[in-house]
Image (tube, rainbow, N blue to C red):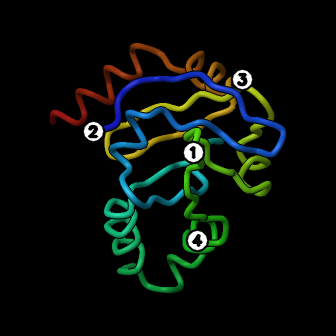
Protein backbone atom coordinates (compact mmCIF):
# COMPACT_ATOMS: atom_id res chain seq x y z
CA UNK A 1 0.00 0.00 0.00
CA UNK A 2 1.32 3.43 -0.96
CA UNK A 3 1.27 5.89 1.94
CA UNK A 4 2.85 9.24 2.63
CA UNK A 5 3.76 12.56 1.05
CA UNK A 6 7.20 13.42 -0.32
CA UNK A 7 8.44 16.73 -1.74
CA UNK A 8 10.98 16.72 -4.55
CA UNK A 9 12.04 18.76 -7.58
CA UNK A 10 11.78 17.99 -11.26
CA UNK A 11 15.06 18.57 -13.06
CA UNK A 12 15.46 20.53 -16.30
CA UNK A 13 14.97 17.35 -18.36
CA UNK A 14 11.64 16.57 -16.69
CA UNK A 15 12.87 13.79 -14.43
CA UNK A 16 11.13 13.30 -11.09
CA UNK A 17 12.48 11.32 -8.14
CA UNK A 18 10.29 8.46 -6.95
CA UNK A 19 10.91 7.65 -3.27
CA UNK A 20 12.70 4.32 -2.70
CA UNK A 21 9.80 3.02 -0.62
CA UNK A 22 7.44 3.61 -3.56
CA UNK A 23 9.88 2.19 -6.12
CA UNK A 24 10.12 -1.01 -4.11
CA UNK A 25 6.33 -1.35 -4.07
CA UNK A 26 5.99 -0.47 -7.77
CA UNK A 27 8.23 -3.36 -8.68
CA UNK A 28 9.60 -3.98 -12.16
CA UNK A 29 7.06 -2.08 -14.20
CA UNK A 30 4.52 0.67 -13.80
CA UNK A 31 2.45 3.09 -15.84
CA UNK A 32 2.19 6.88 -15.53
CA UNK A 33 -0.80 8.70 -17.00
CA UNK A 34 -3.11 11.66 -16.47
CA UNK A 35 -5.22 11.83 -13.35
CA UNK A 36 -8.76 13.16 -13.24
CA UNK A 37 -7.45 15.91 -10.98
CA UNK A 38 -4.56 18.05 -12.30
CA UNK A 39 -1.99 15.44 -11.35
CA UNK A 40 -0.36 12.29 -12.70
CA UNK A 41 -1.23 8.77 -11.57
CA UNK A 42 1.41 6.07 -11.25
CA UNK A 43 0.03 2.52 -11.27
CA UNK A 44 1.93 -0.70 -10.60
CA UNK A 45 1.50 -2.97 -13.66
CA UNK A 46 -0.92 -5.29 -11.83
CA UNK A 47 -3.14 -2.36 -10.75
CA UNK A 48 -2.97 -0.85 -14.24
CA UNK A 49 -4.08 -4.13 -15.78
CA UNK A 50 -7.05 -4.39 -13.37
CA UNK A 51 -7.98 -0.77 -14.05
CA UNK A 52 -7.64 -1.21 -17.82
CA UNK A 53 -9.76 -4.36 -17.76
CA UNK A 54 -12.61 -2.38 -16.17
CA UNK A 55 -12.33 0.30 -18.83
CA UNK A 56 -12.33 -2.30 -21.60
CA UNK A 57 -15.63 -3.70 -20.28
CA UNK A 58 -17.42 -0.44 -21.04
CA UNK A 59 -19.16 -0.10 -24.39
CA UNK A 60 -16.86 1.60 -26.88
CA UNK A 61 -19.15 4.58 -27.37
CA UNK A 62 -19.25 5.29 -23.63
CA UNK A 63 -15.60 4.69 -22.90
CA UNK A 64 -13.84 6.14 -25.92
CA UNK A 65 -13.15 9.50 -24.26
CA UNK A 66 -11.85 7.80 -21.12
CA UNK A 67 -9.63 5.52 -23.20
CA UNK A 68 -8.26 8.45 -25.19
CA UNK A 69 -7.68 10.51 -22.06
CA UNK A 70 -5.79 7.76 -20.21
CA UNK A 71 -4.06 5.72 -22.90
CA UNK A 72 -2.89 8.45 -25.26
CA UNK A 73 -0.64 10.01 -22.65
CA UNK A 74 0.33 6.84 -20.75
CA UNK A 75 3.96 5.85 -20.49
CA UNK A 76 5.90 3.06 -18.79
CA UNK A 77 9.13 4.68 -17.64
CA UNK A 78 12.16 2.97 -16.15
CA UNK A 79 13.81 4.64 -13.16
CA UNK A 80 17.42 5.69 -13.66
CA UNK A 81 20.18 4.77 -11.20
CA UNK A 82 19.16 7.70 -8.97
CA UNK A 83 15.48 6.67 -8.82
CA UNK A 84 14.22 9.34 -11.21
CA UNK A 85 11.70 8.79 -13.99
CA UNK A 86 11.38 10.89 -17.11
CA UNK A 87 7.95 12.49 -17.31
CA UNK A 88 7.06 13.24 -20.95
CA UNK A 89 6.32 16.88 -21.79
CA UNK A 90 2.62 16.19 -22.47
CA UNK A 91 2.20 14.88 -18.92
CA UNK A 92 4.28 17.62 -17.31
CA UNK A 93 2.18 20.20 -19.11
CA UNK A 94 -1.08 18.52 -18.08
CA UNK A 95 -0.10 18.51 -14.40
CA UNK A 96 1.66 21.93 -14.54
CA UNK A 97 4.88 20.32 -13.35
CA UNK A 98 7.81 22.68 -13.72
CA UNK A 99 10.07 22.44 -10.68
CA UNK A 100 8.63 21.56 -7.26
CA UNK A 101 6.58 18.39 -7.05
CA UNK A 102 4.84 16.32 -4.40
CA UNK A 103 4.64 12.55 -4.70
CA UNK A 104 1.84 11.07 -2.60
CA UNK A 105 0.70 7.57 -1.83
CA UNK A 106 -3.03 7.01 -2.21
CA UNK A 107 -3.43 3.34 -1.43
CA UNK A 108 -3.10 1.22 -4.55
CA UNK A 109 -1.30 3.86 -6.64
CA UNK A 110 0.75 7.07 -6.46
CA UNK A 111 -0.05 10.62 -7.53
CA UNK A 112 2.47 13.23 -8.67
CA UNK A 113 1.37 16.84 -8.24
CA UNK A 114 2.99 20.19 -8.83
CA UNK A 115 3.56 21.61 -5.34
CA UNK A 116 1.36 24.61 -6.10
CA UNK A 117 -1.54 22.46 -7.33
CA UNK A 118 -1.22 20.13 -4.31
CA UNK A 119 -1.32 23.08 -1.89
CA UNK A 120 -4.40 24.44 -3.67
CA UNK A 121 -6.05 20.99 -3.52
CA UNK A 122 -5.41 20.76 0.22
CA UNK A 123 -6.87 24.24 0.76
CA UNK A 124 -10.07 23.15 -0.98
CA UNK A 125 -10.52 20.17 1.34
CA UNK A 126 -12.86 20.68 4.23
CA UNK A 127 -13.06 18.38 7.21
CA UNK A 128 -16.85 18.41 6.93
CA UNK A 129 -16.72 17.26 3.31
CA UNK A 130 -14.23 14.49 4.15
CA UNK A 131 -16.41 13.41 7.08
CA UNK A 132 -19.48 13.23 4.82
CA UNK A 133 -17.60 11.14 2.29
CA UNK A 134 -16.35 8.79 4.99
CA UNK A 135 -19.86 8.36 6.38
CA UNK A 136 -21.13 7.58 2.86
CA UNK A 137 -18.45 4.89 2.52
CA UNK A 138 -19.58 3.28 5.77
CA UNK A 139 -23.13 3.34 4.69
Between residue 108 and residue 82, name the one nearer to us.
82
Q: Tag 2's secondary structure? A: loop
Q: Of the residues under marks 2 and 3, which one precedes in the sequence?
A: 2
The disc at residue 81 is 1
Pinpoint residue 2: horizontal percent, then vertical percent.
Answer: 34, 36
Q: Which mark is residue 116?
A: 3
Choose between 110 and 129: the one closer to the eye. Answer: 110
- Mark whose residue sits in front, 2 or 3: 2
Q: Which mark is residue 71?
A: 4
Task: Specify which label sits upstream in the sequence, 1 or 2.
Answer: 2
Vertical relation: 60 (above or below) 47? below
Contact check, label 4 and label 1, Cβ < 8 Å:
no
Mark 2 or 4: in front is: 2
Circle on res. 1:
2
In the rendered structure, are the residues bearing label 2 and label 4 in contact, judged by CB atoms less than 8 Å apart? no
Q: Which residue sits furthest bottom?
A: 60
Q: Observer-nearest residue: 59 or 116?
A: 116
- Dot 1 or dot 3: first in sequence order is 1
Q: Earlier in the sequence, mark 4 or mark 1?
A: 4
Alpha carbon of mark 3 to alpha carbon of mark 4: how far?
26 Å
- Residue drawn at 39 percent across, 15 percent down: 128
Nearer to us of marks 4 and 1 is 1
- The crowding category of the residue bearing disc 2, from other C-alpha atoms within 10 Å (few below 14, some 14 to 19, many at least 20), is few
Q: Between label 1 and label 3, give the one nearer the viewer.
A: 1
Which corner quadrant of the image does residue 64 belong to?
A: bottom right
Q: Tell me where residue 69 appears, x and y as whole percent.
A: 63, 66
Q: CA distance from mark 2 to mark 4?
A: 24 Å
Q: Quadrant of the N terminus?
A: top left
Mark 1 burial class by Cα count in 10 Å: few <14, some 14-19, many 20+: few
User: Would you say 98 lies left or right of 3 here?
Assistant: right
Distance Cα–Cα, label 2 vs label 3: 25 Å
The picture places residue 114, in percent across and down from the top left corner, at 69, 31
Amino acid sequence: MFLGEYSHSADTKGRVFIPAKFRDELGEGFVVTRGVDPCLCVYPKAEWEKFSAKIEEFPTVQARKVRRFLYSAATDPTPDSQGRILIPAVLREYASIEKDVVVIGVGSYIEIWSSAAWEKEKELESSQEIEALMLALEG
